Amino acid sequence: MDEQDPSIRAPRWTDFLPKSEHTELFLHADYDSTTLGPISAWGPTLRSYTSMVFADSRPAIVYWGPDKIAFYNEKAVDTLQEAHPSLMARSFYEVFSELSTSMRPVFDQAASSGQSVEVDNVLLFVQRNGYMEETNFVGSFVPIRGDDFAVDGFYNTYKESTAEVLHARRRQVLDQIAASTPTSVDETLSGFFDALRTNPHDITAALLYSYDELASEGAPNLKLCGNIGFTVGHDNAPLEAHLETGQNGLQPWFRRVRSTGEACVLRPEDDNCRSLFDAVSWCGFAGPPRGLVVHVLSISGTLLGFYVQGINPRRPYDDAMRSSIADIVRQMEVKWINARATEQAQLRERLLEQRATVSENRLRHMAQNAPLGMMQMGRDHCIRFANQQYYDILGMDSTMPNVSGILEALAPDEQEHCLRVTKQLMDGGPRIVEEFRLKRSWRCPDNREHSAWILGVCFPVIEDNEVEVVMIYVLDISHQKWAEDVQMRNAAAARLAKQRQEEFIDVTSHEMRNPLGAITQLADGISRSLLANVTNEPHFWQGIAQESASAADTILACAAHLKRVVDDVLILSRLEGNMLSICPIVAQPAKVVSETIKMFSGEARLIDASLSASRADAYGVWTTDWALIDTSRLTQILINLVSNAIKFTASRSTRQITILYGQSTQRHQRLQTPFGELEWLPPKMSIVTNASLSDPVDGQERLYLYFVIQDTGPGLTSDQMGGLFQRFAQASNRTHVDYGGTGLGLFICRELAEKQGGGVGVASCHGEGSAFGFYIESRAATAEVPQHILAEVSKLDLEASPTVTANAVPRRMSSQLEHANGGPLTILSNGSIRLPTVLNPSEAYHILLVEDNLINQRVLAKQLRMAKCQVTVANNGVEALKLLERATCWQQTPSQRLQSGDQSDYALDIQIVLMDVEMPIMDGLQCSRQIRVLESTGQITRHLPIIATTANVRQEQKDIALAAGVDSVLSKPFTVAEVLAQVKVALVRGDKQAPPKEPAIGETK
């Protein structure tokens, strides 16, 4: 180019270009060696676009000629970096050889089409910052037609979009992590790596470790959860590691970032980090990264794990990259903790569901096995749930789903009340507890049908101020209601019993005080009979004797009445204490009846009544005269019924009493009487049998003995008959006023009959008379009495009328004597033995009377002495033993007798002991035992008979006395005749048991 003086040369086109160093660089560039040639030779078109490039405010480059020789404005310098200034006046293909392949099609397209070609974020690796850097551009390539109108060049304007591309690429990773749905921790961590793999250029490798704070001491607490590019199992990527103690691979750097809380960048050029880049398959642009970034993942002080990322080798580790990695870590932390929270929530939910299921199953199991019914009823009155017990208790059809089934189960009079209760509950009313009677019935313990009852507990379940369901619980209280009814009846019965007992006490007091008053007055009259003006005239003394005898008869009658009252009370107490025993023996039922009639013959004559007995074949064929019966219990029943008949017949114009008896093999005979058919009372026990009898053997049938006592008394109404045979009960309130009595007689008859396997019944016509019947279970027997027994009894020489209780005769003898029809002994209905022979008045006995009661002692001793007996008295058992030492039965050696000198000291020839049981110092039983011991040792030389006297009349008490060694028991009160009768029997038995008598002094054996 020719240099001319500016002041004189003509202006050139380049003079109009901006004045700058860049323009100077352009002007001094070597275009001569290119296809463009020197600047001065450029054509108008090239010059024009040159001016436009330098005037353009955008980075702009012109590529001209087939070699794409470039020149550019100063704005393009920043983007060209290390390509500036080498690109000026040089070929694009020469400077950007790595882009020639990708950009040639662009140039060709623009040239061929004559249209601008737009490029969007084109990836270009630009040598800058000391390495090939990844860049992205957006711009256009506008074809330029030269002076010949051919496309000779391209006008390129552009803008670097690398930051936007990187941001979008990195943002995509964050968005994908953020968009992941919180699931399990493992799925969340796996999702992290799905997102990381979408940006292999920026994330060339990655590791993720989780930390387990609950790991046991010494166990690995780091676990590899994700990996990109690293070789699993290598030192830099172990499957498990121990954070606190591990020294290999990345573990020391993990501890460092945990302690500092800041990221750490590991460079491959560092000697202590070089091994961390081994055995890694790098992603992206290939080749090792410019470094590894290590981050700690923690939130709110909770260590989650560690993240390792290989950075982009074509990009600098600048603030944008540092921020993008930090954003990934923060997003991971949030998602990780959310996943853990979600997992824990899901675990809690599963546990709650599991517990709810278990609880529901338990509740359902409890509901199905509960002793009460449970039901839920919705607002539509339909059953939502009910256990089986609900249907069972109500007796309800489980296929009926609504309230109609409940109403159907209730008693008709309960249904309307149930509907009212249901409406109250559906309206949100309070809890209701009600009892309802059901339509069904149940069989109670007394084997009767009763209405079933339920207790209902109902309450509404309110949700959102509305009744959702009504809960109903039902409990079967049928047994409780029955028990309450029984308790009420028992309480009423107890009150009635108390009232009757009080009445009984009053009546008994009256029944005892009246005869006691008569006895007192009569005895007082006898004692005062000699205080009147006494004369020696015979008729005076005869009158006193007759009055005293009449008074004595009345006293005896009053005493008999008192004894009957006491006997009734004693039998009642023994019945209530279940101490009354039945002791059957072989006897004649007909004789028991005849003895009873004899017993009441005197009373019948006093009221001019006809008292008779006859066998009624209509009750059954009479097959045997002998049977096993308890004569005393049978007699007690007959006495009570006959005495009642006499009492109620006494005031009637016709006074007739008849005892009918018979036997049958059938229980509950239909017995006709003049007053209608006998109505048998139902037994108190479901099974009535005579427990004292053995079961029939060898074809033997049960035998039932029937007795009916008919009288022509006032009769009974149906209401009066309903109150009979109850304790302390009489036909009416007027009965005691008009006829007296304790109200125990019929009750005792019923108890005694049922204890003997039988029952009682009654028939009556008001105003005509009554018939009281009973029957007992028995067995047929035969009568066989050995002759030697009869011979022994024939030796008894007793007076005409005395009686002695059966205890005076051995049981073997008494039962066999009963067979002796018309023999010397007769067993009476009350268990006594009537002795027909006459006591020899010349025969006297020496009796040792042991009695502590001075009155009884004095009276009885006087009566015995009047009967020609010699009586020695002792006040207790000790005195009795002392007296026996002076008796002839006491063993003395001849030398002792010679030394005694006075034989009168041993002159007590005691034959028998009459021993009271209850005494001080030594009672009668102790004394009896001591006497038997002395007999066994020979101190007493012979058997000394002992008769016990006592008011304790129970059989068990008598057995205890017999076991103590007494020969027989005499029950108080008794007469002297009864005492002498037992004395005679005891002496007869004693003579058979006496040992040979020792010879007296001077006698030879």
Image (spheres, grey):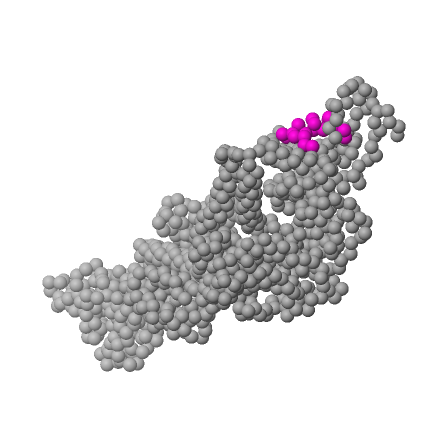
> x%, y% of residue 289?
41, 57
**Where on the picture, by quarter, is residue 396?**
bottom left
Lateral position of residue 278 relative to residue 705, left or right: left
Q: Quadrant of the C terminus?
A: top right
**Where on the picture, by quarter, is residue 964?**
top right
The outermost residue toward the front is 537
Nearer to us in this view, 314 or 23: 314
Nearer to us in this view, 979 or 274: 979
Residue 799, compared with residue 752, is above or below; it is: above
Image point (46%, 49%), residue name: 507
Q: Quadrant of the N terminus?
A: bottom left
Residue 97, compared with residue 245, is above or below; it is: below
Image point (61%, 53%), residue name: 599
Camera sees residue 795: yes
Magenta residue check for 881: yes
Magenta residue check for 477: no
The outermost residue toward the left is 7
> x%, y% of residue 187?
43, 62
> x%, y% of residue 185?
43, 59
Magenta segment range? 870-889
Residue 57, compared with residue 850, is above or below; it is: below
Image point (11%, 63%), residue name: 7
**Where on the picture, by quarter, is residue 435?**
bottom left
- Tally the numbered discs: 0
Nearer to us in this view, 597 or 135: 597
Camera sees residue 164: no
Image point (29%, 72%), residue name: 119
Lateral position of residue 162 relative to residue 437, left or right: left
> x%, y% of residue 753?
60, 58
